[in-house]
Image: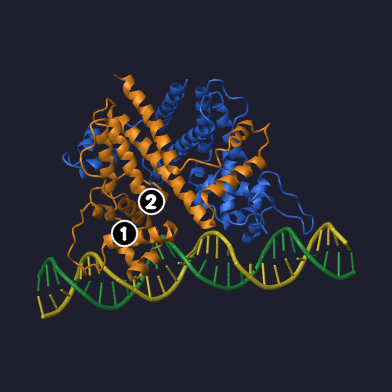
Chain colours: A blue, B orange, C yellow, D green
DNA sequence: CCTTTTCTGTGTATGCCATACACGCTACTG
DNA sequence: CAGTAGCGTGTATGGCATACACAGAAAAGG
């Protein structure tokens, strides 16, 4: 049964992703592969969004019945986890730079690129610490970037989670914004301007002086692009990490 | 019709949240209130999680038919937005501290407290920039904390989004973790230890030297609590913001 | 006063969704 | 060759959001 574990405590479909599945030879040959299922699901998500990924839709794409998928995956959550792993893909190969900041900046940018390639990935809820091959490989690379810093191991992990959370958040915001605009057919500029005008109507200068001041500069009408926002946030965070590292130096 | 706008471009239920609804006097008196609907939905979410909030469940709680809710709200998304606003509640009153860092730290902690009071709020997808009364009030307070800094208005907004994104992320991670543990009945310590042992099995020291090193310190078996993680991340980010402010003199 | 208009609550229906379960079949093990 | 475990599938259950049409209430206008 797909829910059973075999020592690792992992769902068997995740074990399969690690290459740990021995075919028990007994019954008929499987007509499908986990990989084919995940690929089909990824294709649907990329084409029509994560919301379009349903078990029946995936099955239809593969020309099989809905229920056959449950021979490979015990629940939809497992499929989502495997899709997530597929979306990340393997991290860039090679040794990271000696300088932690250079390497770690590259790591964050590469992570963002990977997520942006499959933006739906940020809408998959995180249900557990990383346990799939690619997720762990990204974690390995991130920790490797910090190897020459004087942070303790716990701090390295904390920094990793801080930055990956930031990247994830940033990708989600820009992607959701883009998706909303594509739906409404408006340009980003026009809808940001519309939002600014809306706030101007709703807020008076006495109750909302700071918002009013921000609106008066007109910066919302010519917002920096998502890239600027990403770079700004990443630089701030890494400056903070650098301050910690220097204080130990 | 509930989808119509009246100049603001806002859904009429959101206008109602700003107190902009004039009862048009024509038809029969409404038997419900937006407030009662939102309260019922909030109660369900707090009791059984956001997933338990369905239009039929909310209607049942109020003793009305499902479809009557659509006289007050044009789609479930609007209800979610109103629930979000109710969950945040008004920000703490009073003037923020003179020192930007003191004030802003307090802002972030208060935001975390508000979110933690209704943890389901972090699972409501963000569909638009803040447009509801309490969201804008929180934004006002955050900007007010930064009023004496030498950041330009655009930077203040960027810092605000950076920190609120961080808070949101942090609350989501700790809450999802707690929820998963409540479901499985395991303690956090035991499941973290189980995860560490799992990674030890899956990773070998040659392909995953950094992960192996991190695991060997045993820090995963005695992880810092969510509070430590929150404080660590917030301090790093604010150190980074402080570096920017200082560099401007 | 009566008609018209407009807004209310509701019942019904559509078309999705995940997945439990039972069945027949296949291909290997003894 | 019998047993059995794994496979594909059809059907059924119980959910969900919401479109639509209708009946009745309350006010506006004559």
**Tag 1 secondary structure:** helix
Q: State the residue in front, B115 or B194.
A: B194
Percent across and percent down for residue B133 are 26, 48
Residue drawn 58% across the image and 28% down it:
A144
Residue under pointer 1 = B38
Percent across and percent down for residue B204 are 68, 36
Residue drawn 58% across the image and 45% down it:
B193
Residue A182 seen in the figure: no
> Residue under mark 2: which chain is it in?
B
Image label count: 2
Q: Is residue B233 left or right of residue A139?
A: left
Residue B160 seen in the figure: yes
Percent across and percent down for residue A228 are 40, 29
The residue mark sitting in front, 1 or 2, is 2
The reply to the same-chain question for discs 1 and 2 is yes
Residue under pointer 2 = B121
**Tag 2 secondary structure:** helix
- Is A221 placed above or below B115 here? above
Quarter holding residue B29: bottom left
**Of callouts 1 and 2, the N-terminal one:** 1
What crowding class fits label 2: few (fewer than 14 Cα within 10 Å), some (14-19), or many (20 or more)? many
Residue drawn 40% across the image and 41% down it:
A177
What crowding class fits label 1: few (fewer than 14 Cα within 10 Å), some (14-19), or many (20 or more)? many
Q: State the residue in front, B153 or A189.
A: B153
């Amino acid at each position: 049964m797909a829910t059973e574990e075999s020592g690792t405590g992992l769902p068997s479909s995740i074990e399969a992703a690690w290459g740990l599945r021995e075919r028990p030879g007994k019954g008929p040959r499987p007509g499908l592969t986990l990989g084919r299922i995940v690929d089909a699901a990824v294709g649907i998500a990329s084409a029509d969004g994560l919301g379009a990924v349903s078990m029946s839709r995936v099955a239809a794409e593969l020309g099989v019945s809905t229920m056959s998928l449950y021979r490979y995956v015990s629940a939809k959550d497992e499929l989502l986890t495997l899709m997530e792993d597929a979306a990340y893909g393997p991290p860039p190969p090679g040794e990271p730079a000696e300088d932690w900041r250079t390497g770690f900046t590259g790591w964050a940018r590469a992570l963002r690129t990977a997520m942006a390639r499959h933006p739906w990935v940020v809408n998959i809820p995180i249900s557990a610490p990383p346990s799939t091959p690619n997720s762990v490989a990204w974690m390995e690379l991130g920790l490797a970037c910090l190897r020459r810093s004087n942070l303790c191991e716990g701090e390295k992990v904390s920094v990793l989670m801080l930055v990956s959370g930031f990247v994830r958040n940033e990708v989600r915001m820009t992607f959701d914004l883009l998706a909303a605009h594509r739906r409404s057919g408006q340009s980003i500029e026009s809808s940001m301007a519309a939002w600014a005008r809306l706030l101007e109507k709703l807020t008076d200068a006495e109750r909302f002086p700071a918002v009013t001041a921000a609106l008066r500069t007109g910066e919302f009408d010519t917002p920096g692009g998502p890239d600027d926002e990403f770079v700004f946030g990443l630089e701030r965070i890494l400056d903070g990490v650098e301050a910690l590292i220097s204080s130990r130096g």
